[in-house]
Amino acid sequence: MVTISVIKADTGGFVGHTSVHPDALRRAEEILAPQKGPLLIDYRVAHVGDDIALVMTHARGVENEDIHRLAWDVFQGTTAVAKGLKLYGAGQDLLGDSFSGTVRGLGPGYAEMAFEERPSEPVIVFLADKTSPGAWNLPIYRMFADPFTTPGLVIDPKMHSGFVFEVLDLIGNRVARFSCPEEAYDLLLFIGAPSRYVIRRVLAKSGEEPACATSTQRLSLMAGRYVGKDDPVMIVRCQSGLPAVGEALEPFARPMLVAGWMRGSHYGPLMPVSVEDATPSRFDGPPRVVALGFQIAGGRLVGPRDLFADPAFDAARRAALELADTMRSLGPFEPHRLPLDEMEYTTMPEVLKRVEKRFASV
């Protein structure tokens, strides 16, 4: 049984919210390297926008204290680098100074899954910046339930029975499962509201084999303000009864509107980009997603391949930029700016409190 853990955090942006400083990436490598063998089978240090993502394989299972403590130590180390360089928002995704078993509730986001390695084990790690966990809802649905995106649902006997979607209610802290295709309409009722309901996992119906895992931490609800709400990660296993690599990438060939962008308060297009172009700067965006492809061999990470570097996604990028222009033309008006109930977890309540007495009953 091998476990893949992807744990990310923003511990300081270079410059502003646009990228990660090379010194911070080097520090992460220095802390992880001695643990390859004693604790980890393998690892990669990745980044998107101003977030550092640790891709780690091991045999300890999900939510393991030693693995999460290692990630916490890495982020403490990169925070120290960020403070030394006076990077913006140094340590902003680290809430508190003490580790408490896992990084849940402490700031970093994470996605993990444990599985028996198949004869060939292709995995895609998706990393997004300037958006929220609900951004994965539409692409996951298309990967695992839409035959126009994934023809394997029709022509592959191993996929024909469909998948089980585990949906988390971010407000009510509840979980429900929906079996597709027979409960697709029920599923869509909920995941069509991605600010509240997010897909946490997808399982193959046969034996509940894990197919997809996402980061679903929304810390604004815990911290009372906009902290750690954005920048989700996702792991998708591919081939042999699961979506092909091309099927898992296909949902990103058309841009979709997601919440986040500037100050976490605006809707904008999710643009698939290469790692080289994962440095959002226009209006701190628009939101970006990268796809890192790995073959897992005895727990080793063979790769990554930069899957969105393919020029076949150029049209998606052009369409996303056109959509960005349209949304930006609206300025501070909805639907570019998030609705008021979504703004509750930003700094907007501080403004409302200051002017509250100006409103009189009529």
Image (cartoon, helix red, strand yellow):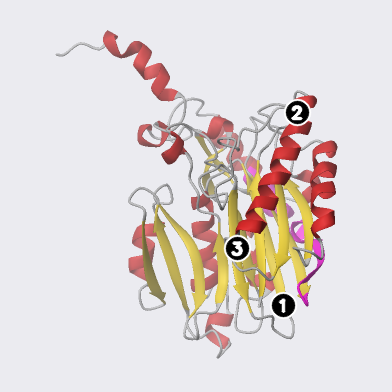
Q: Is residue 255 above or below residue 153?
A: above
Q: Amino acid at mark 1?
A: Glu
**C-alpha span from label 1 to label 2:** 37 Å
Mark 2 near mark 3, Cβ–Cβ under 8 Å? Answer: no
- Front residue of 267/63: it is 63
In the picture, the disc for residue 112 is 3
Q: Specify the quadrant of the image occupied by residue 159.
A: bottom right
**C-alpha span from label 1 to label 3:** 16 Å
Which residue, given by chain and number where applicable, does mark 1 sit on? 121
Q: Specify the quadrant of the image occupied by residue 357.
A: top left
Q: Which residues are magenta?
A: 297-320
Q: Is residue 349 above or below residue 102?
A: above
Mark 1 or mark 2: which comes first in sequence?
A: 2
User: Which quadrant is the C terminus positioned in?
Assistant: top left
Please tell me how crowded label 2 is: few (under 14), some (14-19), or many (20+) other residues with Cα within 10 Å. some
Q: Residue at x 72, y 53 (%)?
A: 54
In the picture, the disc for residue 15 is 2
Mark 1 near mark 2, Cβ–Cβ under 8 Å? Answer: no
Give the structural element (helix, strand or loop) at label 1: loop
Please tell me how crowded label 3 is: few (under 14), some (14-19), or many (20+) other residues with Cα within 10 Å. many
Mark 2 or mark 3: which comes first in sequence?
A: 2
As for residue 309 lying within the magenta part, the answer is yes
Q: Specify the quadrant of the image occupied by residue 1.
A: bottom right
Q: Amino acid at mark 3?
A: Glu
Q: Is residue 21 above or below residue 83?
A: below
Q: Picture coordinates of residue 63 (x, y %)?
A: 57, 60
Mark 1 or mark 3: which comes first in sequence?
A: 3
Q: Amino acid at mark 2?
A: Val
